Image: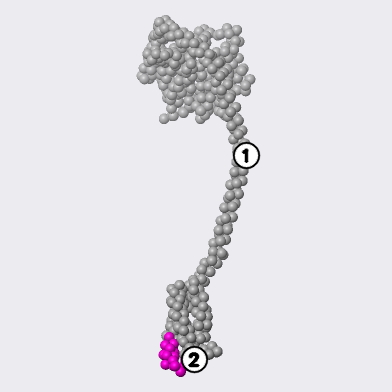
Amino acid sequence: MGGASPVSGSPSWKGKLRRALAAPFRFLLKEELGAVQRLEARVGEVERTIAGAREALERETQERMTVQQQQQRALEDLRNAYLATRGEFEEVRDRRVPQLAQDLAGLQAGLAALQQELELLRDARIPQLERAQGRLQGAFEELQRELVGLRDQRMAELEQAQGRLQGAFEELQREMERLRDVGLPQVEERLAALHRALQEVQALAEEVRDQRLPAAAARLDALVARLFEELSTCRGLLDRMLFREPLAVPRLSPGQEQRLPEAVQRAWLRFLDSQRGRREEILERARIYVDLFAQAQPVLDLGCGRGELLQALAEAGIRAFGVDADPAAVAACRELGFAAEVQDALEALRSRETGSLGGVAAVHLVEHLPTATWMQLFAEAARVLRPGGLLAVESPNPESLRVGASLFWVDPTHLRPVHPEAARFVAEAVGLEVLEIRKLRPFPREQWLAPRAAEPSLQELLAMLDDWLSGPRDFLLIARKPDAV
């Protein structure tokens, strides 16, 4: 009775076994723990039963003799309960524990995989994140520096620009006030003056329409009649050429030639300076001949005057020399270093060999010569030019009434205007091929009448007058000697 029996000691080691088995797997196998708990409950019941049986056994021991039969039945029941408990324990040991071990192995494999993933995160992903964080940190610092720069520099620049704009606005405001107080009254005065000028132009237009235009028309009719007579003469010359008859061009006798008074000759260069314009202006006009004679050398400038054409050709590297009947003009050319001689233009051509020149220029010369003389000049130029050589003749344009009826006669040495079509006819008659007749130097538009008129009908009339009055002042005939057949 005093020692611990196997039955009475069983609850201690079973409880320890249960706790030892349940502790590692309690958090893994809830379902199995439930079964174990149920098993524990049954074991507890068994233990309580055993405890009750032990108490009963103790009582039966005291009453052994009287209750032996009851003890035997209780022992039999206890043995059966022990066997049942042992069978359940063996089932747990043989089936459930291996399953728990297998699940534990799977958990360990998952833990190993999780540990590898954590190592990957630690060794690869975290450094990448750290580098990305470093780049973001650098970008943040750069952005911060840029913002500081914008705050410290650009804001100051914007403030300065704002100050300049404010100053410009104030200046513009002052300018507007000045225009309002000063400029607008001046514009009103100018408009009034323009109105008065328009009235004067209208009065002038009426005068031109009623007085000057009829007079100009009468003079034009006279000029046309005279031109018709000269064209008739030229047509007769052409008919003679077509029938291969010799052209009888009369020469002037020495008695017919007249010399200018000595005083006029001495003042002639001053007259040219006052009437033709500054040397720089005439030199600029002469530039058109550079491209013309670039492949036609040497060039003879007939009536070279002050040497503007010779200078333009020399600066372009084109060989040229000139002749003029005025010794003062030739001396002026020689002082500038240009080749020039005192010689009559027609005699200068006659002294040249046939086909010896590449170009001949006659700038404002033919209007100073009698008709027969400039026609002979064309013929001699055609002779001395080599095949492909060029003849360039520039003269005032009589198609413009302001030129033919007024400006032409300012020069007292002008004999008669040469019409461009008359020049074309003579050039073709002597065997040259007319390449072009250019119209040069129209009058400035501020001198035209049409822009000053307000009424459309008056504008049309004044535009027609502008065509007659303010056409180009000069024409340039360009003729070429055909290649030899």
Q: Can residue 446 be seen by looking at this rendering?
A: yes
Which span of residues is magenta-colored?
62-81
Residue 255 is situated, as x and y percent measured from the top left of the image, at 52, 7
Q: Nearer the viewer, residue 221 or 310?
A: 221
SS category of the residue bearing label 1? helix
Tell me which amino acid carries mark 1: Gln
Residue under the point 62% across and 36% down: 156
Furthest-top residue in this view: 211
Secondary structure at badge 2 equals: helix
Quadrant, the C terminus: top left
Which secondary structure class fits the magenta region best? helix
Residue 272: quadrant of the picture: top right
Q: Residue at x 60, y 7 (%)?
A: 263
Where is mark 2, residue-wise? 62
Q: Is residue 432 above or below residue 56?
A: above
Q: Is residue 140 left or right of residue 367?
A: right
Give the residue type at disc 2.
Gln
Q: Is residue 245 magenta?
A: no
Q: Could you say which quadrant of the image residue 37 lies in?
A: bottom left
Question: Local crowd at mark 2 within 10 Å, few (<14), some, or many (≥20)?
Answer: few
How far apart are the alpha carbons under marks 2 and 1? 111 Å
Q: Earlier in the sequence, mark 2 or mark 1?
A: 2
